[in-house]
Image (tube, grey):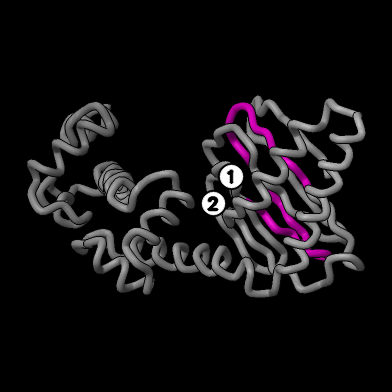
Amino acid sequence: MKFTGEQLCGPTDWAFSESHHVIVVHRAGVLKRLSSQFSTGLSANTLPSKGDCWVIPAGTDYAAEAVGDNVEYCELHLPVGIIGRDFVAAAGTQDRFLYHAIEQLAVLRPYGDDISELLRDNIVQGIRLHLKGYKASAFDSGERYASVIAALESYLRDTLSKRHSLDEMATFTSLAPSTLLRHFRRNFGMTPYRWLLERRIEKSKELLRATKATITDIALDVGFSTPSHFSDQFRKLVGCSPREYRAAIKR
């Protein structure tokens, strides 16, 4: 078990490629971006909360790029012979038991008396039993949610001009609306509404730069119901109107 704290001064690369299992538990700090890629094919852009776990099974290569400020996490290195091989890669799966057990161990770190040692041993045994209870399906939900949200993102990108609702997205993903919102925010750091708005404004900027289409046509093409609504939202995000933006890039 390794407690680690890092000050991220810029984009930081993290990587694991071990013959044993590794679980990384997020303890503190805020990341602005975390892009994860597993050699199993799983990828995620999950922003971590306290108690979120990244599971890297033995023999799996893991690479990530993190952007943020200060971050604290704990690495658990688990021998296959003790835990078994039945682990599945996961990104950002919450494990409150593991998080609280690790926090108790962190509090005990400065103390070397026998009572503290006994308590420490009990906590470690509890963690070991907890992890032995994992089955291949234990982290399936994290993997499933990541892939489902990725599929939703792809669908939304392909249908920016279409009117979308939370109920429609919930139907598309087969998730409850509350579950969809929670995992979408975890992956992208924002609600689906905000994500759609930003993508539509990005697309409109491309059209303003590269085409001679009218403001009205562009507004409808990227999914706004009226040109006035488009102009209002564009000004809020970009700081000027679509017409002013187009004029500025032609100078």
Corner quadrant of residue 104: top right
User: Which class describes the residues within 10 Å of circle 2: few (<14), some (14-19), or many (20+)?
Assistant: many
Q: Is residue 222 visible?
A: yes
Residue 113 lies in the magenta stretch? no
Q: In the rendered image, which residue does mark 2 sit on? A: 45
Q: Are marks 2 and 1 in contact (CB under 8 Å)?
A: yes
Residue drawn at x 65%, y 57% as measured from the top left: 37
Q: How many marks?
A: 2
Mark 1: amino acid: Leu
Corner quadrant of residue 19: bottom right
Which element carries disc 1, helix, strand or loop? Answer: strand
Residue drawn at x 21%, y 28% as measured from the top left: 240
- Please indicate whether residue 221 sits to the left or right of residue 57 in the image: left
Residue 133: percent from left, percent from top: 72, 69
Considering depth in this image, is 134 or 212 the residue closer to the camera? 134
Q: Earlier in the sequence, mark 2 or mark 1?
A: 1
Residue 165: percent from left, percent from top: 22, 62
Q: Residue furthest front?
A: 115
Q: Quadrant of the N terminus?
A: top right
Q: Is residue 210 visible?
A: no
Q: In the rendered image, which residue does mark 1 sit on? A: 34
Mark 2: amino acid: Asn
Considering depth in this image, is 78 or 207 the residue closer to the camera? 78
Residue 87: percent from left, percent from top: 74, 69
- Please indicate whether residue 127 sits to the left or right of residue 140 in the image: right
